[in-house]
Image (cartoon, rainbow, N blue to C red):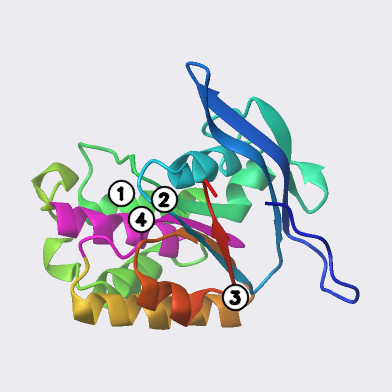
Amino acid sequence: MTEGMPAGRAPDLLAVSGLCKSYSGVPVLQDVGFTLRPGEAIALVGPNGAGKTTLLRCVAGIEEPDEGVVELEGRRFRETDPEARAAMACLLDDFDYFPDLSVADHLALYAWAHGVPDPERTVEDVLRELDLLPLADRLPITLSSGQRHRFGLASCLVRPRRILLLDEPEQRLDAEGRAWLVSRLGAELASGVAVLFASHDRELVDAVADRVIEVGS
């Protein structure tokens, strides 16, 4: 599943080519290729086990593909590169956190580490937006799975980003939360942020994605 480059298109922010990944000799990803431009959203769809999460983890540099290249603005993407880390905000299936820091302190540290000019104000705004203000002083381990998922989304939104990489961001959100997600991703795209996300929610895909890639087909 490789796409060409239409004439006159904006420069690519992210380019994936020839990506292959196997586990114990069983192919999961085979010759995956696509490009992503600023302000564009691509949805990865397919059944469970098709390789959507694996693809996101390879793009994020968390897993090394067997073959293929991931490039950020024409340069090979390496997770250890500070410029690369600064560009990509990720919410994957293994969202990590500092267990001994409160929700608010964790997010403030994250914002400060990424050079946000006013970390405290940014954190407060994002906590309010995600209805997490009442939980600001709680430890992450005490949160429910739904609260922890919103906490993971908040960790992406308190920092600068040029690409949002999201694995099933609609998980554990109620109808109101999913409506918020559509609106928020629309605002991200309007500001020039690119979005690459995996989802089983057809309504979310139809509302947000410019293009859809069937993984495992």
Q: Amino acid at mark 2?
A: Tyr
Q: Label 4: few (<14), some or many (≥20) within 10 Å?
A: many
Q: Amino acid at mark 1?
A: His
Asked whether 156 or 207 is in front, the reply is 207
Q: Which of marks 3 and 1 precedes in the sequence?
A: 1
Residue where numbered disc 1 is placed: 106
| Image-based side of 11 in relation to 193, left or right | right
Residue where numbered disc 3 is placed: 210
Q: Are marks 2 and 4 in contact (CB under 8 Å)?
A: yes
Q: Are marks 1 and 2 in contact (CB under 8 Å)?
A: yes
In this rendering, the label closer to the viewer, 3 or 4: 3
- Position of residue 155 measured from the top left corner of the image (x, y, whole percent): 37, 56
| Image-based side of 200 in relation to 21, left or right | left
Q: Are marks 3 and 4 in contact (CB under 8 Å)?
A: no
Q: Are marks 1 and 4 in contact (CB under 8 Å)?
A: yes
Which residue: 26% across, 72% down?
A: 130
Q: CA distance from mark 1 to mark 3?
A: 33 Å
Residue where numbered disc 4 is placed: 108
